[in-house]
Amino acid sequence: MNKQYAINRKNVMKPLPEDSVVVLFSGSHIKTSADGEYPFVVNRNFYHLTGINEPNLILVMDHTSEILYIEESDEMFEKWIGKKISKDEATALSDILKIAYLDAFEPTQLEAYKNVYFDLEKDQISNHLSLSEIFVREHNITANDVYDIIAKDRTVKSEAEVSKMQEAMHITNRGLMRILQNLKPGLRESVLEAHFDFELKSENVINAFDTIAASGENATVLHYVTNNEFTKDGDLMLFDLGATKDLYCADISRTYPVSGVFSPRQKELYDMVLGAMEKVIDAIKPGVTMSELNDIVNEYYGVELVRLNVIDNKYDVKNYYYHGVSHSLGLDTHDVGLSRDEALVAGNVITVEPGIYIKEEGIGIRIEDNILVTEDGHVNLSEFIPKTTEEIEEIMRNGK
Ligand SMILES: [Mn+2]
């Protein structure tokens, strides 16, 4: 994998003018209060270029050299927290040969370049200035933004990156199996979430995002994450969740019957969603856009929802299906760099997640797989995760 990060660095340097330098921060811990800290979240663009998930590192690279600045460990830190990353470990992960300690980093060394690039972190969600912005202001540097170039490079996944993502999908599948083995009426929704998390903790990986575990009508709320109500006999339960592997995300949705059997009504709606999913997946190939994929769902639903007596005319689809069918997936769950109207290319990984949300019937269904775009079409990377009503009922009957 480490060669991959060297390739990523090359890809990012390639379009930059000759006399350029790129400076990237890994990020720092954010305090909750007193001596508490939020879990460290690495700048994903930094990770894309180094494979290192550690705070307070700086990557500096130009067309002929690269150097990674790391923190020097001290005895007291080691007694309380443990070791910091060593020079050898940093090289092993990133394939960067030249590693130095932070105090050797001099902002004045950037003056030798005509073009100085920072990741100005367009994707940051807080109102705080990013580390890069603070640094650039403090040292009065005229900085260019390298964000778009890195984000674009992240949209095309290498084989190594795809296999990490698929590992995340396998962990996700094992978590879903635990859910299927434990799902029954009378449980708090968060208990099912806990069964999923048990698998992730056992693998020592983190969630790709907050788990949605929504039973009955709650499933018609798209981003329901309170997971605080109780499962009821006869309801469906919608799960939208994902594990990570080395920060590469899976994003899977499945909808299961709480009591182990789909009612005829639930089954016909479920099979409609599954039908939409198959149509979208079939259409995926280079040149197609995510907007066009969404049109396929709307068109299909326009016919099917009338047939199933949900709506009287196709213009009302929007009241029962109100999100896009796809987004890019990678180091971020909603990955950066690929817009809805852009032609897909080989190496993109996108989700396909049609849903149907009928509040009047207390039914919300979403089914989501993760698809790799290839030269001649696509591969469904999460195909192995059971999703037909027959498979689901069978597993719930037999417990495996
Ligand atoms: Mn998704």
Image (tube, grey):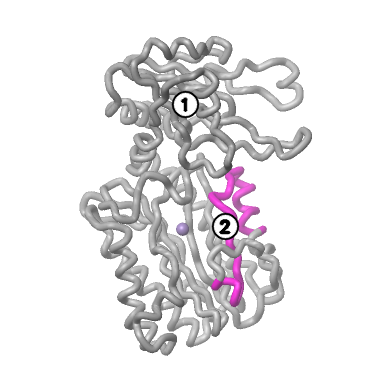
What residue does disc 2 label? 175
Instruction: Give percent across and percent down for residue 213.
Output: 60, 65
Instruction: Find residue 101 and report its image quarter.
Output: top right
Please report the residue visible at 48 percent of the width from the left and 55 percent of the height from the top: 251
- Give the residue type that dot 1 points to: Leu
Q: Please name the residue that numbered disc 1 is placed on.
A: 24
Q: Which residues are magenta?
A: 194-220
Give the quarter of the figure containing the C terminus: bottom right
First-in-chain label (1 vs 2): 1
State which quarter of the image contains the N terminus: top left
Q: Residue at x 52, y 13 (%)?
A: 105
Q: Nearer the viewer, residue 214 or 143?
A: 143
Judge by depth and name the residue closer to the eye, 369 or 146.
Answer: 146
State the SS at label 2: helix
Q: In which quadrant of the rendered view does residue 233 lie?
A: bottom right
Q: Amino acid at mark 2?
A: Gly
Residue 231, given in percent of the width and then of the height, sits at: 66, 74
Q: Is residue 65 above or below residue 303?
A: above
Residue 87 coordinates in the image, percent (x, y): 54, 17
Residue 184 occupies quadrant: bottom right
What's the residue at 47%, 31% (across, down)? 46
Disc ID at residue 46: none
Q: Secondary structure at mark 1?
A: strand
Position of 335 relative to 229 (above/below): above
Query: Quick check: 185 above or below 248?
Result: below
The answer to whether any part of residue 225 appears in the image is yes
Q: Does the Cβ of the disc 1 residue fall within 8 Å of ligand 1?
A: no
